[in-house]
Amino acid sequence: MSNDLGAKPSNFLTKIIQADLDSGKHSEVITRFPPEPNGFLHVGHAKSICLNFGLAEQFQGRCHLRFDDTNPEKESPEYIQSIQEDIQWLGFQWDGEVRYASSYFKQLHDWAVELIKAGQAYVCSLTPEEARQYRGTLTEPGKASPYRERSVEENLDLFSRMKAGEFKEGEHVLRAKIDMASPNMNMRDPILYRVRFVEHHQTGNEWCIYPMYDFTHPLSDAIEEITHSICTLEFEDHRPLYDWAIDHVSVPAKPHQYEFARLNLNYTVTSKRKLKQLVDEKIVTGWDDPRMPTISGMRRRGFTPNSIRNFCDSIGVAKANSTVDVGMLEAAIRDDLNENAPRAMGVLRPLKLTITNYPESQVEELTAPNHPQREALGQRTLPFTREIFIDQEDFREEANKKFKRLVLGKEVRLRNAYVVRADEVIKDEAGHIVEIKCTYDADTLGKDPADGRKVKGVIHWVSATHSVPAEVRLYDRLFNDATPDAYKDEDFMSFINPHSLEVLADARVEPSLKTAAPETTFQFEREGYFVVDRYDSTEDKLIFNKTIGLRDTWAKVEAGSQ
């Protein structure tokens, strides 16, 4: 079986798979995405999802979704549900029903008994502290447990009593009998089973012994007859144990593990422990806070499935770890939204502008394209009135020639409308500008002024009487250090960007957005890309999250700091 690799760039995994198909080693490709349901998925998982599901699609194979749920103390149905939603939102669908490693607990137990009978596993009664001492170090070999040579009969009896709940947690464990002198710490008689009196979210209280991940994972792959078990490089040192487990029990298939470089992004943390710390300490509002690198957070921020998939494709698949500039991810969403997001006008910091020579009661219906390059997206109506709002940042009483917006005594064009001139400024008692009085040129709608004078600036606006109030949340990068994941738990929090969120409660948007559905994304002209918040926005209160700016402002910041 051959496959046309022209649709996507070739990499070392596609070459391995194609060679396996060409040689007849495999007639069908079966991959799997095997998350532990102990947290929300993040952008690094997105790469693994795109890779495992993408390879199955590319080679007309199948991809399983299996939860490797071996640690019920840290797992929950909430995580299981969120993970399924994330995968489907990204545009993938797993083969068959959702699978759980816990469904294989009986078979895994039987294989553990098989190992005991073969003299390949034993019940160890060292305390956790003693076990650490016996394990050795990276430079010193470990020592054999005094319980390593227990008889098969004694091991079977003790393991059976562990299963029956006769022992306390930590009193006994089942260990593989491999090599205490191995330079690979994972091979120094690793634990296969431990006692835990915890109710499991899938099996309830059926079990009080639970298999370890490194025992469960390879054997679950074997049960499902996975052809290519693909994981990140941190599992490379675990591969000998993966192979050992498969080689020492009577499995129906013998999958092989392949490692690829995980996705490391600068200005980002992906450690589950650190992400949980951000949530627990209320630095963010939750796992789906738009500043979080979780898929749920990115979705709420306004990132699109297509942009994330394109980003994962663009960074490729490598064998060596490296750090990717988060600017590449931001460019991917910016490119996608530039092409697909309809345009609208939103004034984030309103400043009243009164056109004194415009009829007080007149409402003029102007039209504007929803997208400058995509006629199929149609047009929208913009009500134009005597009183409008412009953004505070678009006016100066005095400014140099570089300022291309409205200046007292000068002219500017209102987007899709007329040329206006600022004639007078009204201030409050504190000296703050509260209103600008202007005049407009009625002959300039949709064209240059009739007398040939040149107007350089164009600013956006909304009608003061017809616009819709909205709350706008301006999100930025959560960290102001490029390598926050490199710092310890107590240190990385010191690099939180204090300006990662600014809430503008008094913004105004054009009336066409009044019925905008949650998760709809727009380009607010001259401001950036914004999405209707999927949870907090209601018919009575529109809430927009800033997805990304029109251009990379961080590049200038970083260049200035060098």
Image (cartoon, rainbow, N blue to C red):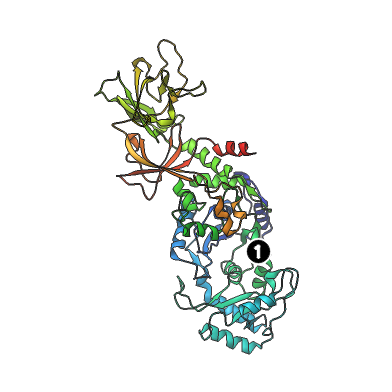
**Could you say where residue 34 lies in the image, as x and y percent from the top left?**
55, 62
Vertical side of 144 occupied by 391: above or below: above
Residue at 44% across, 65% down: 77
Q: Residue furthest front?
A: 429
| Quadrant (top left, top right, bottom left, bottom right) of the C terminus | top right
Res. 193 image quadrant: bottom right
**Could you say where residue 20 lies in the image, as x and y percent from the top left?**
67, 58
Give the side of residue 187 with respect to residue 480, left or right.
Answer: right
Going by the numbered disc 1, the residue's amino acid type is His
Residue at 45% across, 74% down: 199
| Quadrant (top left, top right, bottom left, bottom right) of the N terminus | bottom right
Vertical side of 68 occupied by 557: above or below: above
Q: Residue furthest left?
A: 361
How many numbered callouts? 1
**Viewer can see residue 16:** yes
**Could you say where residue 278 lies in the image, as x and y percent from the top left?**
50, 56
**Could you say where residue 27 lies in the image, as x and y percent from the top left?**
62, 60
Q: Within 10 angstroms of label 1, few (less than 14), some, or many (20 or more) residues?
A: some
* Residue that label 1 marks: 256
Task: Label 1, secondary structure: give it.
Answer: strand
Residue at 58% across, 86% down: 158
* Nearer-the-camera pick, 326 or 220: 326
* Nearer-the-camera pick, 431 or 163: 431
Vertical side of 253 occupied by 541: above or below: above
Residue at 61% across, 77% down: 128
Res. 375 image quadrant: top left
Res. 157 image quadrant: bottom right
**Viewer can see residue 49:** no
